[in-house]
Image: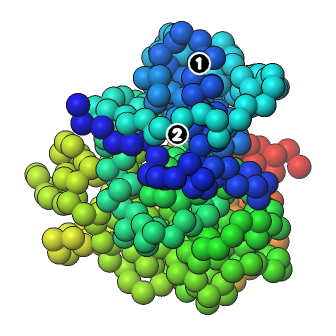
C-alpha cells in the first residue's frame, strides 16, 4: 500500500509548532495526537473548529491516524451546520471553545488531556504513514444556490500538492521556517499554507492566529527566523497603513483575493522581504504562484497543466487527479504559465460595456484615503432606462461620497460609477478576508435601510 508520512520531521526533537513562543517537538505532537485519537467518539466524521492552530492540527492528525474524516466548511452558520449534519449524520464537533454553540455532539479538546502530564520522550518515536488513498478531509464551497458543495480530498492529493509546491515557495531548503498565519486553519488556504505546509515540508507553524497589526508583529517577533507570514491582501493593507514597528520577516505569502502590484511592491520595500501570491481553488488546491511585484504571469506547480476544451479552461496533472474546470478567466501563455483576468462570475456588463468586479475594486482601493471598498450588483436596482446599476461600500474616513465619486470618475467608465456609494466603518469580510457577493448585498441593503430611516 502506497503511503506518505504524516510528518516530514525525521527527529523526535524537530520543532513542529510554537505555542506562545514555546517550541513543540515532533515527539510531543505525535504523542498528543495519539492520545486524542484514543479518546474520540466512535464516529467517522469530525467537524474540527479548534481556534488554536496547534489543537486544530493535533485534531487533524488524530483523525488521520484513526481513519476519521475532517469536515471543513467555509462557515459555521446554523444553516450550514444543519446541512453538514444531513451530509454526515454521525458528525461530532471538536472544539476548544467552552462556549461553542454549534448544534452537534461536542468534544471539548482540553478535556482530552485531563490528568497527569505525559512524558512524550518515553514513548517510541514512530511517524505513521497514511495511505495515499485514505479520505482525509471533505472541504466545502458554496454553489450557485448557496448550499455547501463537498469536495473529497485524499491524503495523497493533499500531500502531493504541498510536496510539489514547497520548493517553489522556497520552503523546502532544509531550514525550518516558522510559519505565522493570520488566516484560520479550517479554510483551504490556511489549511494548506500553515498546517499542511508545516507538517509535510519540515517547517513549524505558530499556534496563534493574530488579527490586529500589533498582534501580528508580536506573533512574528515571538518565533525564530527564518519566518514566513501567511496572510491576505486586506491584512497587508492594514499592516501597511498602521504605525506598528514590524520585526524582520523572510517571506510573505498572500491569497484569497487579487493583490495589486502597487501593494506588493510597498510590502516588499517596507519589510525588505519577498512576497509571493498563491493561486488555487477549493477544487484544485494550490496550483500556481507569482512574485506580484515583478510579474503578472503565474507559474504552475510541477506537473500541473492547463488546457482548453470547448472554450473552458481545465487543470490536470501533478496532484490534480481529474480534469477539473477552472472558474476563472485564464489566458494560457506558456506550458507552465498563464495570466489571470478575473473570475467567470466576476464579470459584469452594464449598458453593453464589460468590466469585472476585480478591476473595479482594484481601482477603488487604489485611491488614496480608501482603506477598504468593494463594488456589488444590487438586484432590482436600475435607473429610468432599466439598466442595472452597480453599488459600492467603502471605508474612507477622510473622504465624502461626492469626493470619492469624482476620484473614481478619473479611473473608470462613468457607466460603472456606483449608485449608491455607501460610506461605512467596516466591511463584512469573513475570517480569510473574503467578501461574498451575497453577504455584501445583504450588508448594503441594511445600510440603505439605516440611511433611509435617518
Q: From this view, report whether residue 137 is shown above or below residue 408.
A: above
Q: Earlier in the sequence, mark 2 or mark 1?
A: 1
- Which x, y percent locates residue 441? 61, 46
Q: Nearer the viewer, residue 226 or 168?
A: 226
Image quadrant containing the N terminus? top left
> Residue 173, can we see it?
yes
Q: Quadrant of residue 418?
A: bottom right
Q: From this view, report whether residue 123 is shown above or below residue 393.
A: above
Residue 38: image tag: 1
**Residue at 40% of width from left, 63% of height from top?**
166
Q: Is residue 249 left or right of residue 196?
A: right
Inter-mark Cα distance, 2 to 1: 17 Å
Q: Residues within 10 Å of mark 1 (few under 14, many from 20)?
A: few
Q: Secondary structure at mark 1?
A: helix
Q: From this view, report whether residue 442 is shown above or below residue 410.
A: above
Q: Residues within 10 Å of mark 2 (few under 14, many from 20)?
A: some
Q: Nearer the viewer, residue 191 or 298?
A: 191
- Which x, y percent locates residue 433? 62, 55
**Residue at 64% of width from left, 61% of height from top?**
180
- Which x, y percent locates residue 291? 43, 79
Query: Which-is-in-front pick, marks 2 and 1?
Result: 2
Residue 125: image tag: 2
- Which x, y percent locates residue 91? 54, 16
Q: Secondary structure at mark 2?
A: loop
Q: From this view, report whether residue 408 is shown above or below residue 129.
A: below
Q: Is residue 165 left or right of residue 361?
A: left
Amino acid at each position: 500500500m502506497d503511503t506518505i508520512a504524516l510528518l516530514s520531521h525525521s527527529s523526535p526533537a524537530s520543532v513542529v509548532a510554537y505555542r506562545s513562543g514555546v517550541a513543540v517537538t515532533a515527539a510531543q505532537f505525535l504523542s498528543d495526537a495519539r492520545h486524542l485519537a484514543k479518546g474520540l467518539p466512535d464516529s467517522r466524521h469530525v467537524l474540527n473548529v479548534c481556534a488554536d492552530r496547534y489543537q486544530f492540527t493535533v485534531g487533524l492528525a488524530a483523525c488521520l491516524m484513526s481513519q476519521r474524516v475532517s469536515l471543513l466548511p467555509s462557515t459555521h452558520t446554523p444553516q450550514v451546520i444543519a446541512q453538514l449534519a444531513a451530509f454526515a449524520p454521525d458528525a461530532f464537533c471538536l472544539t476548544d471553545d467552552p462556549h461553542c454553540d454549534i448544534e452537534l455532539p461536542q468534544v471539548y479538546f482540553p478535556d482530552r488531556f485531563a490528568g497527569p502530564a505525559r512524558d512524550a520522550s518515553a514513548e517510541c518515536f514512530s511517524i505513521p504513514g497514511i495511505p495515499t488513498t485514505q479520505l482525509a478531509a471533505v472541504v466545502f464551497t458554496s454553489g450557485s444556490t448557496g448550499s455547501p458543495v463537498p469536495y473529497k480530498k485524499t491524503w495523497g492529493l493533499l500531500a502531493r500538492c504541498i510536496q510539489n509546491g514547497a520548493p517553489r515557495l522556497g520552503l523546502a531548503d532544509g531550514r525550518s521556517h516558522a510559519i505565522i498565519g493570520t488566516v484560520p486553519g479550517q479554510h483551504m488556504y490556511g489549511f494548506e499554507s500553515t498546517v499542511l505546509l508545516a507538517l509535510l515540508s519540515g517547517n513549524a507553524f505558530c499556534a496563534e492566529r493574530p488579527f490586529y497589526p500589533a498582534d501580528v508583529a508580536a506573533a512574528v517577533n515571538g518565533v525564530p527566523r527564518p519566518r514566513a507570514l501567511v496572510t491576505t491582501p486586506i491584512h497587508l493593507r492594514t499592516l501597511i497603513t498602521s504605525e506598528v514597528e514590524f520585526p524582520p520577516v523572510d517571506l510573505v505569502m498572500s491569497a484569497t483575493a487579487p493583490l495589486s502590484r502597487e501593494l506588493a511592491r510597498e510590502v516588499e520595500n517596507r519589510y525588505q522581504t519577498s512576497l509571493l501570491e498563491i493561486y488555487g481553488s477549493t477544487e484544485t488546491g494550490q496550483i500556481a504562484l507569482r512574485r506580484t511585484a515583478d510579474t503578472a504571469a503565474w507559474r504552475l506547480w510541477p506537473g500541473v497543466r492547463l488546457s482548453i476544451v470547448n472554450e473552458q479552461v481545465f487543470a490536470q496533472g501533478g496532484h490534480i487527479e481529474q480534469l477539473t474546470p477552472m472558474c476563472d478567466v485564464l489566458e494560457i501563455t506558456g506550458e507552465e504559465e498563464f495570466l489571470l483576468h478575473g473570475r467567470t462570475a466576476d464579470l459584469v456588463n452594464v449598458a453593453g460595456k464589460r468590466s469585472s468586479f476585480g478591476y473595479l475594486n482594484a481601482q477603488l482601493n487604489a485611491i488614496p484615503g480608501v482603506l477598504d471598498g468593494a463594488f456589488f450588483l444590487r438586484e432590482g436596482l436600475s435607473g429610468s432606462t432599466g439598466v442595472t446599476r452597480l453599488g459600492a461600500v467603502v471605508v474612507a474616513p477622510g473622504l465624502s461620497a461626492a469626493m470619492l465619486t469624482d476620484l473614481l470618475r478619473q479611473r473608470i467608465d462613468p457607466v460603472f460609477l456606483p449608485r449608491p456609494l455607501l460610506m461605512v466603518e467596516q466591511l463584512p469580510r469573513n475570517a480569510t478576508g473574503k467578501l461574498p457577493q451575497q453577504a455584501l448585498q445583504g450588508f448594503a441593503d441594511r445600510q440603505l435601510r439605516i440611511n433611509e430611516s435617518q
